[in-house]
Amino acid sequence: METLARIGRFGLFGAAVARRVFTPPWNTRDFFRHTWLVSTRCMGPVVAVTFPFGMVIGLQGLQIFDLFGAQRMLPSLISVAVLRELSPMLASVLVAAQGGSSFAAELGAMRIKEELDATEVMAVDSLRWHVVPRVLALMLATPVLNVMGTVAGLAGGFVMAVPIQGEPGGVFLANLWAFTVPFDLVVGVVKTVVFGLLIGLVACFHGYYATGGAAGVGKSVNDTVVHSVLLFFAANYLLTSAMFAP
Amino acid sequence: MSWLATLGRFAGFCFDLARANTFRMPPPGRTMEEAYRIGVQSLPVLLLISVFVGTNLSLQGYAAFTPLGGQRLVGMFVALAGVRELAPIIAATMVAAKAGTEMASQIAVMRTREQVDALEVMAINPLWWLVTPRLLAIVLVMPALTVVAIFTTIASSWLVATAQLGLNGTEFLDFVRTSIDAKDLLACELKGMIFGVVICLVSCFCGFTSAKGPEGVGQATNSAVVIASVSCVTLNFLLSQVLYG
């Protein structure tokens, strides 16, 4: 029953945030500050993860295509895999691990030190002032980071195939976009906006309702990463089904 | 240059840990307790995530192979991508997110409450007492979790392939069976163990070097999960290159 109550509280929290997103006043300064901070903090981890993953696809894909003598197909496989699935997922996992958990830690520390109560006492709406900018910042930053992840993943595949395995570079570049269509770019953006929203809501929910001192902050950071990853993997299945399944 | 100093401190941490354990049995009875905790805590999350990874592998394989008329190859795609690469890395990321963050925050909280110093005062080496059981436990548990991830991924993608996409289930399993062999499973186990060691060392290091107070705990937990998952993915590439390249 405890879980059910928490899910209900999460729904109410989401509704409260949504109501404040569409009504003035907006805290634009914090929104831009958080977007900038999240993007710069997550940029390194996102690139550091998607680049090796692109290399791994190159490595494994070459082995399969060698069986059929179809090495030409490798770049098409890499671009499809990276654009549609890997880059949105990996970028979102890293945004949850880095951006989401740092928001949860910040809000949790503010709750524990009673800074959030202090804002309320000064008649400032703490949800509007502290939570809404963070949620919107993650919603904007995740698609941007996804683009960087995509570029890094493709670069990883290129580095694996051309300089390391000695495939001809011109063939690689000529076949890169053979199976991708402009719709794939839309897919990446739609997915990452939804994932960013989910991460932002989960992170702020756990941070905002943190209890129990320093250990509580650690627990809320822990829960943030786990719950947001679970939630957007489930969302990913539904979105992929909606966009690709027959 | 501060990252270089941190790297050096991490090397020092590993050296101290090794020195604390030479010619010494691990703390009695703690290892199985930690193994139970790490394994049982991470299991539900891992199961759910690998179900969704499997479903998506099927969907994407189908979408990618249909233009070529090769829908039958979905089984091969799932086996190669799922077993060789995704299952170990998914298990590692989830253990880092669940058990790794927990280690970091536990140790950071002990640091904040000066319980680590209290251990030192009692002439108990905190590295030996706190890190060694966790390290042994995670090495014990990671291969098992990897196998669970492999099984769940393949089962859920089989379900999607037959029920949602209308492929032939027997043919799917035949392709899975012919595309992977025992060597792939052994490679997965090896990867799992190495990822376990990395996750444990990084998380415990972040916990031990955390600043005091709530922000310190949050910060330590945050950097533990990021550093652990980035280093696992990078190591994954190197291991794949060595094992399959």
Image: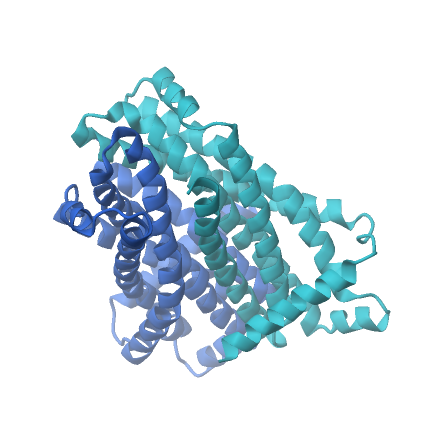
Chain colours: A blue, B cyan
Please give the name of the residue rendered at 20% of the width and 29% of the height, measured from the top-left corner. Answer: B66
Residue A175 vs residue A26: left or right?
left
Please give the name of the residue rendered at 75% of the width and 70% of the height, measured from the top-left corner. Answer: B116
Would you place residue A154 above or below residue A120 in this image?
above
Is residue A210 visible in this depiction of the protein? no
Would you place residue B23 above or below residue B48 in this image?
below
Please give the name of the residue rendered at 59% of the width and 67% of the height, measured from the top-left corner. Answer: B206
Task: Tell me the quarter of the picture where residue A181 sits.
Answer: top left
| Rendered-image quadrant of the C terminus of chain B | top left
Q: Position of residue A167 (x, y in %)?
A: 25, 46
Task: Tell me the quarter of the picture where residue A243 sits.
Answer: top left
Residue B44 vs residue B24: left or right?
left
Is residue B33 visible in this depiction of the protein? yes
Would you place residue A212 above or below residue A129 in this image?
above
Q: How many marks?
A: 0
Task: Tell me the quarter of the picture where residue B12 sits.
Answer: bottom right
Q: Position of residue B228 (x, y in %)?
A: 52, 58
